[in-house]
Amino acid sequence: MFNMVFSSVVNSVVKDVVKVLGGPPRAFDPASLFVVGTMAQVPGDYIEIGTWFGASALVTALIKKRMGVDGTVTCIDPFKGDTPEYRLATPSKEAVLESAQKLDVELDIIAKPSYPWPKELEDRTWTVGYVDGDHRHPQPKRDLDNLSARTSSYLIVDDFGKTMLDIRSSVLNFMLRNPDQTLFMVFKNCIVLRKV
């Protein structure tokens, strides 16, 4: 079992990662990083869809390292897009790996879209999944369905705020279609579902 508290370790790791990334726009929402850092304490492998500059993946890998929690960290992101965020900064696999090197953590990065599902990940499963990819319909639904079939315990969804209607409706419809997914936690714009 793990402690569902924003511990001093989680606070320290979030601070270290935000410092390495230089803050916004490379690390948009520290609130979600506290949730991800807490969920990183769950033993097992972690996968995320939507990496941007790697803040959530870096927090997860660094928590696992500092706390001695077993598990790998896999990231899926094509590192290209047409959303307004791409006018602020241009993420890349190389930039994420450079930050991982600075923090002395390992990440497995698949620089491809999450749909269709990457063939090299077809037979893999994870314990915790994190959805923060393309926020436009129908992609949140696709990402939830893909990760639900491949994760055994928890799904974290970022940007579940009032203005993100495609994400909110996708999550609510997903919960209706999947009664084995229950609400575990909501913190600010982040929701965590637990498979029972």
Image (cartoon, helix red, strand yellow):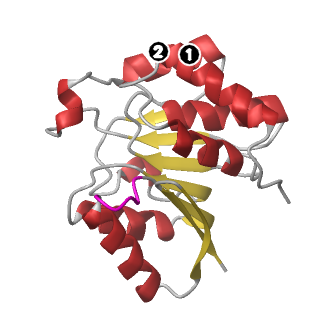
What residue did someone put label 2 on? 22
What residue did someone put label 1 on? 19
Which residue lies at the image location 53% right of the left edge and 88% below the top edge? Answer: 179
Tell me which amino acid carries mark 1.
Answer: Lys
Residue density around tag 1, few if under 14, some if 14–19, many if 20 or more, within 10 Å: few
Quadrant for the N terminus in the image = bottom right
Q: Quadrant of residue 117?
A: bottom left
Image position of 158 with respect to 142: above or below:
above
Image position of 149 with respect to 77: above or below:
below
Q: Quadrant of residue 162?
A: bottom left
The percent coordinates of residue 123 (x first, y second) are 51, 59
Q: Main secondary structure of the magenta part?
A: loop
Cα gap from disc 2 to disc 1, whole angstroms: 5 Å
Residue density around tag 2, few if under 14, some if 14–19, many if 20 or more, within 10 Å: few
Name the element at disc 2: loop
Image position of 21 with respect to 109: above or below:
above
Q: Is residue 162 magenta?
A: yes
Task: Report the residue that reaches farthest toward the left.
Answer: 82
Which residue lies at the image location 69% right of the left edge and 28% below the top edge? Answer: 13
Q: Horizontally, is 161 left or right of 154 in the view? A: left
Residues rendered magenta in the picture? 159-163
Label 2 with label 1: CB-CB less than 8 Å: yes
Name the element at disc 1: helix
Tell me which amino acid carries mark 2.
Answer: Gly
Which residue lies at the image location 26% right of the left edge and 65% below the top edge? Answer: 166
Quadrant for the C terminus in the image = bottom right
The percent coordinates of residue 6 (x first, y second) are 74, 44
Q: Is residue 63 magenta?
A: no
Q: Which of 8/71 is in front?
A: 8
Label placed on residue 177 = none
Q: Horizontally, is 45 left or right of 41 in the view? A: left
Which residue lies at the image location 48% right of the left edge and 84% below the top edge? Answer: 178
